[in-house]
């Protein structure tokens, strides 16, 4: 009985009921105190969680605002920071030369793979009707990236979404050159995948040990203070990478 | 660079994925200059200042997250959402926030050009200087109560004030059976926000937070797993995360925790009832 009521309440909150069913549900609630209480418990639980989430988000906002301020001051005091940084680098070099200290380094490919996050499957929202695209999605969702590459690379005139996911499939089979070509094209284009491609291109260069390209790409992202991947890129740049 | 990393659907997917994906998506929205500027503009036109704009923007981002998590986001575009919600939220704030209302009033009274314009329309329509002064003063009293009663529906507050004064003088002329001013099609009788409900909302927020914090840690955790994002986890998955033997045990625990929360609320507010229309 309780489970029946739970199902009804959950359907109501998921907005799965037709207007008629909704009316029926509200009527039933007036006559059934058990159902009314369950509804109240659900409402309260959701509202209480939302209050927690709101508090967390407000703290997060303060932190993000602080970050924006920090980024601004970073730009403002850049010449001083560069001078200090140059001095520190000289000191560090002197320290290494004179005291032969071993600095712990990380290999680029390992770091790139640990930073890499596979995007969620595109689902079947765009490119519907394209059998190769749909087939590739099924491969992608089952982590069969070779299969995804086979299906998607055969698509003629792929749209940016297709190119973006194909680039990820190439990345995941270790074909970094193809992945880099696609990410680079997207990064220079005007599609919604621009910022993400900037970031993944950076990781691809790192995974492929392309130090010069990595540095150029890092500088490119760093030049844009509003870039959503700025912080991640700066964090990545701080690692001692073994090329 | 003028590229958007998220389409509306991608943004929603990221929020519904939770964790870092959600954080990144919300941070992107929070730092979005266009959305922020749009909200600030609406609030400043509505008589507020930049700080008020910031507060309203934060509220809008919180609401966006909530609606997406609950799968209740119905607005066509994110732009539209910020535009309509900024207006509503600012009007809501004006119902309960005396200081914000005072700020709006001082903003109106410091606009001498507006005052002259109102005086001019009254004096050129059979009014004396004294009538103009009285109408202006009455207009301030009336706009204050309109804001308190949720009758201000957003938009330019100075324009709204001008219309309030215009209507006051038109009614005065009608009463005195003098030549009337033409109708301006301006109707402030529709009340879009319920002031009583807004006051309760503020009170409820504090209460819900308090009673939730009284629950044990595992109850807090299971309620969060269940209600943070709609359908993120099945009962079997919740059981696995919580270390329960199976989904049925998770379901029973969840039921107990829901009841505990409701009973805690009854201690503070035994007559509490929800408005059932969502």
Image (tube, coloured by chain):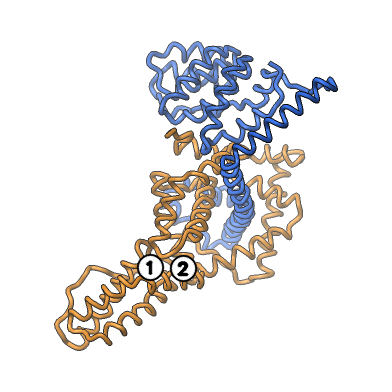
Q: Quadrant of residue B86?
A: bottom left
Q: Which residue is mark 1?
A: B152
Which part of the image, by quadrant, shows the N terminus of chain B? top left
Q: Which chain does the residue under circle 1 lie in?
A: B
Residue A221: give x, y in percent of width and height.
54, 30
Residue B180: give x, y in percent of width and height.
16, 80
Q: Which chain does the residue under circle 2 lie in?
A: B
Tell me the colour chain B is drawn in.
orange
At x 53%, y 37%, the residue is A225
Residue B58: give x, y in percent of width and height.
53, 53
Compared across the picture, whether B80 is left or right of A72 comes to left
* Chain letter of the blue region: A
Q: Secondary structure at mark 2?
A: helix
Gap between marks 2 and 1, in whole Å?
9 Å
Q: Which residue is mark 2?
A: B94
Residue A2 seen: no
At x 29%, y 76%, the residue is B165
Q: Characterize the local packing of mark 2: few (<14), some (14-19) or many (20 or more) Cα atoms within 10 angstroms.
A: many
Q: Characterize the local packing of mark 1: few (<14), some (14-19) or many (20 or more) Cα atoms within 10 angstroms.
A: many
Residue B262 seen: yes
Compared across the picture, whether A182 is left or right of B245 comes to left
Q: Residue furthest right?
A: A99
Q: Quadrant of residue B245?
A: top right
Residue B77: give x, y in percent of width and height.
40, 44
Tags 2 and 1 on a common chain: yes
At x 44%, y 11%, the residue is A154
Q: Are marks 2 and 1 in contact (CB under 8 Å)?
A: yes
Who comes first in sequence, dot 2 or dot 1?
Answer: 2
**B86 lies above or below B244:** below
Q: Nearer the viewer, residue A91 or A144?
A: A91
């Amino acid at each position: 009985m309780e489970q029946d009521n739970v199902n009804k309440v959950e359907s109501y909150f998921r907005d799965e009921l037709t207007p008629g069913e909704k009316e029926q549900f509200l009527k039933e609630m007036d006559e059934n105190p058990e159902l009314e209480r369950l509804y109240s418990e659900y409402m309260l639980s959701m509202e209480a969680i939302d209050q927690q989430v709101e508090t967390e988000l407000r703290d997060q906002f303060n932190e993000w605002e602080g970050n924006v301020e920090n980024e601004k001051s970073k730009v403002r005091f850049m010449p001083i920071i560069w001078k200090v940084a140059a001095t520190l680098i000289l000191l560090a070099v002197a320290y290494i030369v004179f005291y032969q200290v071993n600095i712990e380094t990380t290999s680029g490919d390992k770091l790139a793979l640990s930073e890499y996050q596979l995007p969620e499957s595109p689902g079947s929202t765009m490119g519907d009707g394209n059998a190769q695209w749909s087939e590739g999605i099924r491969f992608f969702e089952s982590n069969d990236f070779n299969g995804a590459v086979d299906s998607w690379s055969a698509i003629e005139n792929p749209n940016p979404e297709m190119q973006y996911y194909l680039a990820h499939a190439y990345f995941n089979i270790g074909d970094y050159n193809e992945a880099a070509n696609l990410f680079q094209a997207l990064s220079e284009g005007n599609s919604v995948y621009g910022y993400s491609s900037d970031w993944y291109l950076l990781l691809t260069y790192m995974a492929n040990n392309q130090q010069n390209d990595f540095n150029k790409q890092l500088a490119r992202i760093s030049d844009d203070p509003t870039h959503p991947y700025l912080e991640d890129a700066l964090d990545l740049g701080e690692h001692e990478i073994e090329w | 660079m003028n590229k958007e990393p998220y389409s509306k659907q991608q943004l929603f997917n990221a929020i519904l994925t939770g964790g870092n994906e959600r954080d990144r998506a919300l941070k992107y929205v929070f730092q979005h200059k266009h959305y922020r500027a749009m909200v600030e503009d609406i609030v400043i036109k509505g008589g507020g200042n930049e700080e008020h704009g910031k507060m309203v923007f934060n509220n809008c981002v919180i609401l966006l997250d909530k609606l997406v998590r609950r799968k209740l986001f119905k607005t066509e575009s994110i732009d539209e959402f910020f535009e309509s919600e900024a207006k509503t939220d600012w009007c809501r704030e004006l119902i309960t926030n005396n200081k914000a209302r005072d700020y709006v009033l001082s903003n109106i009274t410091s606009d001498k050009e507006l005052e002259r314009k109102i005086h001019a329309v009254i004096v050129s329509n059979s009014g004396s200087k004294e009538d103009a002064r009285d109408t202006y003063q009455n207009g301030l009293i009336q706009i204050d109560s309109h804001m308190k009663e949720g009758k201000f529906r957003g938009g330019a507050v100075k324009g709204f004030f001008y219309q309030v004064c215009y209507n006051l003088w038109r009614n005065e002329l009608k009463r005195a059976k003098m030549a009337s001013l033409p109708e301006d099609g301006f109707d402030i009788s529709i009340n879009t926000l319920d002031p009583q409900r807004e006051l309760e909302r503020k009170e409820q927020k504090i209460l819900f937070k308090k009673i939730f914090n009284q629950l044990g840690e595992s109850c807090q955790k299971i309620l969060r797993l269940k209600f943070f994002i709609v359908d993120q986890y099945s009962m079997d998955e919740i059981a696995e995360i919580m270390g329960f033997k199976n989904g049925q045990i998770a379901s029973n625990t969840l039921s107990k925790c829901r009841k505990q929360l409701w009973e805690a609320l009854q201690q503070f507010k035994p007559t509490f009832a929800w408005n059932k229309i969502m």
